[in-house]
Each structure stands twice: as C-alpha cells, then as structure tokens.
Amino acid sequence: MSSVTVRRTVTALASALALAGAAASPAAAAPRTIELVNLGDSYSAAFGTGGLQQVDGLPGCLQGTGRDHVDKLAAHPRVEVTLDAACAGYETHEVRGLVDEQPVAEALSDADVVTLTMGGNDIGWAQFIQACSAPFEAAGGPGTCDAMLAGAPALIAGAAGSAAGTVAAIDAASDARIVVLGYPPLFDERQDTPLLSAERAAQLNDWTDELNAALAAAVEEEGAVFVDVTDRFRGHGVGSPDPWILFDLESEHNLHPTERGYLSGYFPGLLSEVARAR
C-alpha cells in the first residue's frame, strides 16, 4: 500500500476554547492539537450519508461522502484527523491487518486518539435482518430467523474476542487513547412495520445490546474506552417518526446512521472521549 489519502480536512474556524471547554488566558500557551486516526467499518466510514468514494491506497475500501462524527471533529481547530482509513464491510481481523501497513503504522505512532467501530460485520447482521423480515417470514415461516437468533451468542463471542485482538494490535503500535464506539438500535420496536414485526425488531435490538456489551467488556479489558450510543439513538430507529437510521430499498447505505444520526448520536459521546486525551 503506497499511501492513504485523508478525506476529511481540518477547517480552521475561530475558536479560543480547548476541547475541555476551558478558556485560555492571554499568557497561557495555546492548547495542543490532538492527532486522531480513524479506523473501523462502515459506521466509522460515513455510510448512510450518501455517495461513495474510494480511499486511495486501499483497494475496495469505500466511505460515504456526507458529513459524520469524524468530519465534525476534523472541523475543530484543536483536532487534526491525520488518517481516515475506515472501510465499509471490514471485519475486525481486516481492521487489525491495517495496523502493520506503513502509512497506518506511521500515523498510529504519532496519534493521540484512535477511533473505530468494529464487530458488526463479523456477526453478519444483514443476514439476520433478511431472515427475520416480515416478507421473508411470510413466505417461509419463522424457522430460519429463530435458528439464526439461536446462533447469535456464539457469533457475538467470536466478534468480541477478535475485537480485543484488534485493540491489542493497535495498542502495541500506538500510545493513543483507543475509543471504540458501539452500534445503535436499528429499529423502532413499538409497532409492526412492513420490514419487521415489533417482536422481531425488539429481538434484533436486544442482540445489538448483547453485541455492545460483549464488545465493551472485551475492548476495555485491553485498555480501550467503549462509547455506548444506545440511549442517544433510542426512539430514532427504522419505523420511528424521526428515524436516524436510513432505510431506502434503493440505497446501498441501508441500516446505517443518517447524517443526523452521526452528528447527534455518535458525535457527542466521541467528543467527550477525545477531550480526555487533551
């Protein structure tokens, strides 16, 4: 891999506040800039915001083109996103494989914060959603969905274990604060929708909670910080009056946060953790 192009640039807007919010006196030294590296899967790669772009130097690595939580951080005058190598579709072992690549290794060696989401692709949630969808069950019955749900614990345990290995690899390559963000509840479970019954929506949300809990335990054991975004997204799933999760049959960004979801759901929790690395 020759190079990785950072797609998000820092916008130097006027601000006299450090990330922690304390005003600097005229005599005080300017707060230092935090160098941030973004890795992970599609939930770190702005999927759901529209458009697609290829990351230079990483064949097959795609990101969305709209604004997300990483873009908003990059606009902060005290944050520099030195590398954005999040790739839609990446599993935990693929994220881990980036660590030894020269441009990534170089960025990690100087990073203050590393942010990422990972684990969802190890589970294969898309297959669960298809099998548990109302149209699929109407055609073939509940057996496939029930069988897949019964197998979820083993898949979650495997994903969490692999995520821990990825955090360990990042930690070995960097002194940065490692921030792993969780996944939002994707569905509104208060009523049946054309996509899912309320019962199935609740079951799938419950397994997302289980995945988040397993990821949190695994990555915190390796010294990372886990940010749970469940409460911020609650009530904004597919089928709600104000969804922050995209669902459009013609979109390849389905079941990812919208721009509003990234900026209102992911950004606040991430900002507080970045501030602690100041």
Image: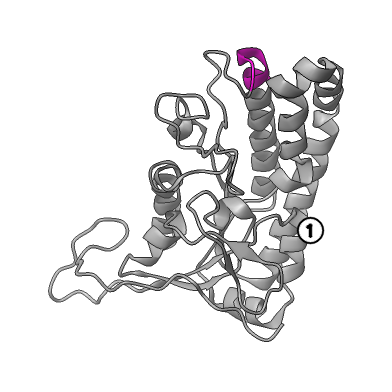
Lateral position of residue 184 relative to residue 144, left or right: left
Observer-nearest residue: 143 or 85? 143
What residue does disc 1 label? 93
Tag 1: amino acid? His
User: In x, y percent, where is residue 87?
Assistant: 64, 61
Residue at horizontal 73%, vertical 58%? 166
Which residue ends up furthest to the left in the rendered image?
Answer: 26
- Give the main secondary structure, helix, strand or loop, of the magenta stretch: helix
User: In x, y percent, where is residue 82?
Assistant: 49, 75
**The N terminus lies in quadrant:** bottom right
Residue at horizontal 37%, vertical 59%? 72
Observer-nearest residue: 158 or 70? 70
User: In x, y percent, where is residue 10?
Assistant: 37, 72
SS category of the residue bearing label 1: helix
Lateral position of residue 133 relative to residue 9, left or right: right
Residue at horizontal 74%, vertical 75%? 100
Q: Which residues fall within the magenta stretch? A: 196-203
Residue at horizontal 68%, vertical 18%? 200
Asked whether the viewer can see residue 224, the reply is: no
